[in-house]
Amino acid sequence: MTIVTRFAPSPTGYLHIGGARTALFNWLYAKHTGGQFHLRIEDTDRERSTPEAVAAILEGMKWLGLHWDGEPLLQFSRAARHAEVALGLLAAGKAYHCYASQEELAEMRDAAKKAGMPIRYDGRWRDRPASDAPAGVKPVVRFKAPQTGETVIDDKVQGSVRVGNEQLDDMVLLRADGTPTYMLAVVVDDHDMGVTHIIRGDDHLNNAFRQLNLIRALGWPEPIYAHIPLIHGPDGAKLSKRHGALGVEAYRDMGYLPEALRNYLLRLGWGHGDAEIISDAQAVEWFTLEAIGRSASRFDFAKLANLNGHYMRQADSAYLAKASEPFLEKQLGRPLAPAERDLFVALMPGLKERAKTLVELADGAHSTFARLSPDEKAVQLLDADAKAMLGALLPRLRALAAWDAAAIEASVRAFSEEKGLKLGKVAQPLRAAVTGRAVSPPIFDIVALLGREESFARIAANSGLKA
């Protein structure tokens, strides 16, 4: 049997971080088993579903690296198929027309609330003859749910979960206007797509009992369920925007790498021993549903940043420069020239050691690509003594035959030793004069990569010395 999983977001907003983890788990399980992973856009809520949200979901999935098999399925486009199934149940006596008015339904809800009971439809049209139908009223179609016994789900995460069927009312399959409900559409689409494993948040567990009874009434193969505990904030409360309940695009814009976010989301509720740094290949090899925990996991921005920093330090310089280039260009307010792109790659070994996000990486590079006036800390470094010292150093630098980091460092070291100074006492003012900042990538690398003319021009501009 080919394992088939699916991710089925509603396009009423962005691809939020909890949905991204659900998508990741479905993707990994399909890859682990050599199966298929499909994407379905559940756009049956026509008032709230938007093309912009669909585009955001697709873009978020692509950026995160979760590529699906085949074309995305738009649920609303299959409304005729959903209605066909409902009408088949109606013809088989497994569903019925319900003529209850909105006023009657409101009375049921109010009575249940006053009695402290769950709100359920009372089945008043379940066994009534068609001759009782009021004239001019369009009915809904309701499913005849079992009323005795219990429904049991052997969930791969939650274990054996059961509910008494008397707690499940007759859900609506078709609205009065003939449009299918979400509960019907999900069941039909999962069947027609050949979905074998439904991996989703445990907020859908109550739906699963109703959907499973519908599947059984249709005589269709039953899927295997795995309901994942939700993600909470660091304080244990439900995840909110202040905790990190943001769209995937927000993490991209904050400068996180997709591979780091995949690794972090994987470890939110799933584990393999003590492993923290897990490559995609390892994740695919190790991933099982049984290793998903039953407790809610807690989102921690500090852990994500540290993990992202690790991936950045391990990343190829050219890849990292390309990924962070948009952030640097935004800061500069202009595109990088081809020569500057080469310079950015050359600076990367020094830059990535100090950064945890691509934004921080761009911050570190900014002073190399723009002539910045000294900030407060740089001004403090460029006092009268420092300027005099730089004035004595410059002739030595101008006289260098070879202009590379090793030659520049050797010259500055020799000067420091002659003056009886520690290297930092010379290198720090040089850094402040060249970059306008007290912190930067290795200064000798920067001076070498900027070239003689640019380096001397910056020193002159920021220290008042003659270039």
Image: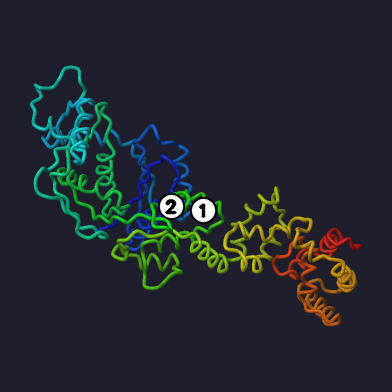
Q: Position of residue 72 (x, y in %)?
A: 39, 45
Q: Position of residue 453 (x, y in %)?
A: 85, 62
Frontmost residue, 123 versus 380: 380
How many labels, in total?
Answer: 2
Q: Is residue 83 above or below residue 130?
A: below
| Direction top: furthest residue | 135
Q: Secondary structure at mark 1?
A: helix
Q: Decide: few, some or many residues near mark 1? Use Cα within 10 Å; few <14, some 14-19, many ≥20.
A: some
The residue tagged 1 is 251
Residue in the image at 36% along x and 64% along y: 270
Q: Is residue 3 above or below residue 406?
A: above
Frontmost residue, 191 versus 234: 234
Q: State how far apart marks 2 and 1 are (Cα).
A: 9 Å
Q: Are marks 2 and 1 in contact (CB under 8 Å)?
A: yes
Left or right relative to 32: residue 82: left
The answer to which quarter of the image holds residue 268 is: bottom left
Q: Decide: few, some or many residues near mark 2? Use Cα within 10 Å; few <14, some 14-19, many ≥20.
A: many
User: Upstream in the sequence, badge 2 or badge 1?
Assistant: 2
Q: Position of residue 266 (x, y in %)?
A: 40, 62
The answer to which quarter of the image holds residue 346 is: bottom right
Visible residue check, residue 85: no
Residue 17 numbered mark, or none? 2
The answer to which quarter of the image holds residue 132 is: top left
Left or right relative to 25: residue 419: right
Residue in the image at 36% along x and 38% along y: 43
Quadrant of the image for the N terminus? bottom left
